[in-house]
Image (cartoon, helix red, strand yellow):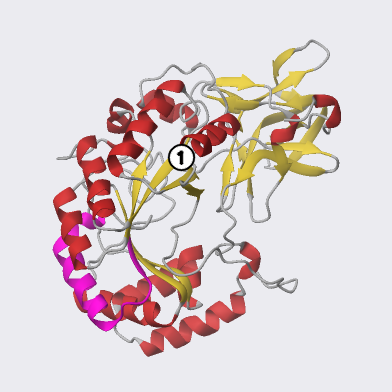
Amino acid sequence: MPPRHALPADPCLVVANRDGRVFEIPEILALGRSGGTAVRVHPAEFMPLPHGSLLFHLPGRRPVGWDPRSGRPTTLSEYQGTPVCAAACFLPPAFTHLYLSAWEREPGATPLPLYAYTALAWRDGAFVTPAVRVDPDERQEVANFDRDEIERRAEAMLQSQPGNRLVEHLVKNCALTYCCPAARNYVLGRFEAPMPTSPACNADCVGCISYQPSEEIPVTQPRLTFQPTVDEIVEMASAHLEHADRAIVSFGQGCEGEPLLRADVLEESIRKIRERTKRGTVHINTNASRPEAVRRLVGAGLNSIRISLNSCQPKFYDRYYRPRGYSFDDVLQSGRAVAEGGGTVSFNYFIFSGLTDTEDEFVALQGAVARAGTHVIQARNLNIDPDLYLGALGLPADMAPGFGLTRWMKRVRKAWPSMRFGYFNPPREGGPFKARPVAPGLR
């Protein structure tokens, strides 16, 4: 990094009032959170808040900032007579956080919804955040979606494949109701099309975004309630692969359970898809719990796999995923099965400042990459209340900070010079999507 005197000033703390209005406190500097500790963030690690970010106010969490007058952290409960709580941002796709929002949790505060709570600050009249863009692909940029065009094409797509419940689910629920970027791209006939197929799962993830046993933690992507047939899958997938630019169809989505539980259906579907077209990429996002099933899918024509991991240390993996009937060794064997079959292996590596960037975790990552034959590391932010996560993993609430995610990314690139490092599933054909400028108002 350049010397501090050549950098912009440290940004100031951003907080929220009880009504959710977010504002800066000029007298207090922003801090970030790594592990369970509030830490100073180098000014160079802040970037302008990406377009498409969401701002959150966090009830029951008092903001922690740096008081330059005392030279130490300070916790605020009010500012100029107004009660305040912590604020955070949720980054759009392709961006990875470097630090979480720093707060002090009040006794009795309920768990936060399942989002990633990145630090938010203010500098030179604009919001900034400690984050980095890890993927140049613009396939899910907010500015590249025209709502009117999506609605027009949605109606045409429903008419072109009447009675297909999978198509109807993707169009009506995912694209039009929840505005899922992948489903919206499917409706627009481009890039990666999601293909949820399984209502059931063989893991009980602490941060599952589609199912929670208690209403205390609301789900953000309600789970699929039916099982698409082979015919429904083949019709939907073949049409997309035959015509879409840089086409991918992906089993395994946030709105479903574990696709490998329907391996027989997936295997038959893939064979029939490949009888119709050799174009595009057939992909699976999965917990990779069944290596024998994965081998069968590769034999049928599966091209790539993305394996979800919160940690490469089995003890932390088990405490988060709470797997039923499979082990971490099975997960890595599934990756190896795809690599040996000539396919692409990605780790969907959930980033958590203070765990990802520890020496023990980096050593474990090296071993997992070697065993699975990994080609791509997708650095995706873990959507969970950080305090809930540390408790679930058996880590102390005041866990020491890591060595820094900026340094971690440099070490990844040094350790694996040929490793692709990004966010999205890569297609077999074509490079990253770079959009042309979109007229204002097309959102």
Which of 226 and 284 lies nearest the eye of the viewer? 284
Q: Is residue 415 left or right of residue 239?
A: right
Q: Is 154 part of what is drawn in magenta?
A: no
Point out the image quarter for the N terminus: top right
Q: Is residue 163 visible?
A: yes
Q: Start and end of the magenta stretch?
A: 258-283
Q: Main secondary structure of the magenta part?
A: helix
Image coordinates of residue 9 in percent, x first then y, are 83, 30
Q: Quadrant of residue 160?
A: bottom left
Task: Note whether 439 is above or below 210 in the view shown.
Answer: below
Q: Quadrant of residue 77?
A: top right
| Element at label 1 | loop
Q: For the point 33% across and 75% down, which residue is it?
A: 237
Which residue is identified by label 1?
Answer: 416
Q: Is residue 119 left or right of residue 152?
A: right
Image coordinates of residue 337 in percent, x first then y, are 22, 51
State the count of labels.
1
Q: Looking at the picture, which amino acid does disc 1 mark?
A: Trp
Image coordinates of residue 95 in percent, x first then y, are 58, 48
Q: For the point 45% across and 68% down, which residue is it?
A: 183
Which of 266 and 347 lies nearest the eye of the viewer? 347
Task: Note whether 351 is above or below 241 in the view shown.
Answer: above
Point out the image quarter for the C terminus: bottom right
Q: Quadrant of residue 66?
A: top right
Q: For the point 29% across and 84% down, which residue is it?
A: 163
Task: Characterize the local packing of mark 1: few (<14), some (14-19) or many (20 or more) Cα atoms within 10 angstroms.
Answer: few
